[in-house]
Amino acid sequence: MALDIHATPSRVPARLDARSVPKRIALVTLATDHTSERDFARICDPDRIGVYVNRIAFENPTTKETLLKTGPRLSEAAAQILPGEEVDVVAYGCTAASIVLGNDAVTRHLNAAKPDTPCVTPSSAAFAAFAALGAKRVSLLTPYSAEVTEEMAQYFAAHGPEVVNATCFGLTDDREMARISEDSIIEAAIAACSGQADALFLSCTALRAATCVQQIEDRLGKPVVTSNQAMAWHCQRLAGITDPVQGYGRLFEL
């Protein structure tokens, strides 16, 4: 039996805040990504930072050719995140693609959708992290093939710190990269870090490395930077959030 109920206007007007959450991060990830959103959720305070995510198509294996295809997909994906609204930072969560495309090209694609907005990639965030940590010589550990890893080492050498050595797991499917065990990551990281390096970089947003940072730093006695950890850190700093976050290494203690 239908009830004869009529809605009446509230006597208390709806007072609108400027935003539902103070800071906004727009994050574009690969369709195959298992890890980036979880790491951002761990690191970013949801009461202060909204992380809004969209995904783009990606076809494994991870090669220069498949990574290059992601560039033209970035603008539309970023535009679909809070359409017509401003965000504090826009980020693309693929380290290898940022290397192959180049950070300047990624910025152009993202700013086509979100004009005048700071842009972050894992590699640009890593460079900012190394500078903040005073690290001029780094060791690299990646899950990629030797070919993609060598291209990354060359890009780092040209745009960032000196690369002392580079080590890779030799995988070509980013879904498998996301399944590398944390024990494997920790052991490989310790083995990969040269005594001549000021810091260690663990590449790939698929790699479950952010949660391993503290353990690796404790054993190495050196700063450790990972793709998602650095990206979350740099996005927060650009958004004006400077609070320390426990458990994610020296970078968040600066």
Image (cartoon, rainbow, N blue to C red):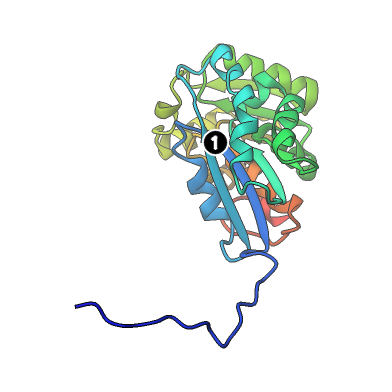
Name the image quarter holding the N terminus.
Answer: bottom left
Question: Mark 1 belongs to which amino acid?
Answer: Thr
Instruction: Read off the residue under disc 1.
Output: 29
Q: Is residue 189 left or right of residue 90?
A: left
Quadrant in the picture for residue 18: bottom right
Name the image quarter holding the C terminus.
Answer: bottom right
Q: Is residue 139 left or right of residue 10?
A: right
Q: Is residue 116 above or below residue 32?
A: below
Residue in front for this viewpoint, 52 or 151: 52
Q: Position of residue 20 (x, y in %)?
A: 61, 65
- Residue at 51% x, 15% y is 145
Quadrant in the picture for residue 66: top right
Q: Position of residue 108 (x, y in %)?
A: 75, 29
Farthest residue, direction bottom: 11
- Residue at 67% x, 49% y is 233
Farthest residue, direction left: 1
Q: Is residue 3 above or below residue 87?
A: below
Q: Position of residue 155 (x, y in %)?
A: 72, 20
Q: Is residue 162 left or right of residue 24?
A: right
- Residue at 59% x, 56% y is 50
- Residue at 59% x, 26% y is 73
Q: Is residue 70 above or below residue 42?
A: above
Residue 85 appears in the figure: yes
Q: Count the marks: how many?
A: 1
Residue in front for this viewpoint, 17 or 60: 17
Q: Position of residue 111 (x, y in %)?
A: 74, 36
Label 1 neighbourhood size at 10 Å, few (<14), some (14-19), many (20+)?
many
Is label 1 in a helix, a strand or a loop?
Answer: strand
Residue 223 appears in the figure: no
